[in-house]
Amino acid sequence: MNDIKKSMTTLIATFITGFLYSTILLYFLSMFAETIAWFCVFATQLGLVAGCLLAILRRSEALALIKTSGMGDAANAMGTNNHVNAADMGRYGIHMIFVAVFMGIFAIMFFCMMFSQFKHIKTAINVIEASAEFLIGNPRVIVLPFIYFAVTVIGLVFWAYTLAAIMSLNDVVSD
């Protein structure tokens, strides 16, 4: 119980911060839902393509290190003190080509899904925007459950207190 008392300030600050961030997010979604959604879609596509290209670049670097003479110099060029040999770099190159193919396939699949489901994505964005505007316009939908929870907890504490008081009046004997 003492730990809860010590951390009560942090718990209240966390609750208030979460509530404020949620409120700010609602206002941002109300104003910029379409922009935020399309930014996320394009950032995901860009990340998949960039991951594919980075894996290809890392593979070509590994192959270039294998081709250079003296793998000790190649290990120093990579910035490691570990022993690196041609077999390790070859396996690394193979892993990177698998990563590149995997990321490339996902990038193509993601693009095809976004292209084929464009109309549904627009509808989903409109639903998000409408729901954010509804919540901003009707704050009682957000506030009322917290008030109801507080009333319930107060009622439960009162009930437990009265139960303890009644129990203390008589001896309880089981039959």
Image (tube, rainbow, N blue to C red):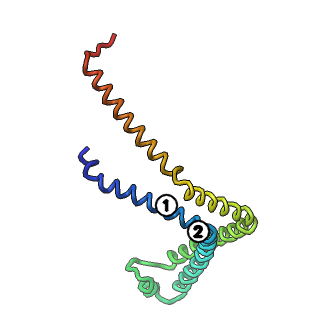
Q: Which mark is residue 175?
A: none
N-term-proximal mark, 1 vs 2: 1
Query: Do callouts 1 and 2 mark residues in contact (Cβ within 8 Å)?
Result: no
Judging by the rendered image, the residue that carries numbered circle 2 is 31
Residue located at (36% from left, 30% from top): 159
Displayed quadrant of residue 97: bottom right
Is 156 positioned to the left or the right of 50 in the image?
left
Q: Which of 148 and 73 lies nearest the eye of the viewer?
A: 148
- Separation of residues labelled 1 and 2 (CA atoms): 13 Å
Looking at the rendered structure, the kind of residue marked 2 is: Met
Is 138 positioned to the left or the right of 147 in the image?
right
The answer to whether one can see residue 8 in this image is yes
Residue 71 placement (x, y as % from top left): 46, 84
Q: Relative to 97, say whether 125 is above or below.
A: above
Q: Which of 86 and 9 lies nearest the eye of the viewer?
A: 9
Q: Quick one: SS at disc 2? A: helix
Looking at the rendered structure, the kind of residue marked 1 is: Thr
Residue located at (71% from left, 65% from top): 113
Displayed quadrant of residue 38: bottom right
Residue located at (71% from left, 61% from top): 123
Mark 2 neighbour class, 10 Å CA radius: few under 14, some 14 to 19, many 20 or more: some
Displayed quadrant of residue 28: bottom right
Q: Quick one: SS at disc 1? A: helix
Q: Which of 104 and 121 lies nearest the eye of the viewer?
A: 121
Q: Which of 118 and 51 lies nearest the eye of the viewer?
A: 118
Q: Relative to 36, say whether 62 is above or below.
A: below
Residue 93 placement (x, y as % from top left): 56, 76
Image quadrant where one finds the C terminus: top left
Image quadrant where one finds the N terminus: top left
Q: Which mark is residue 23?
A: 1
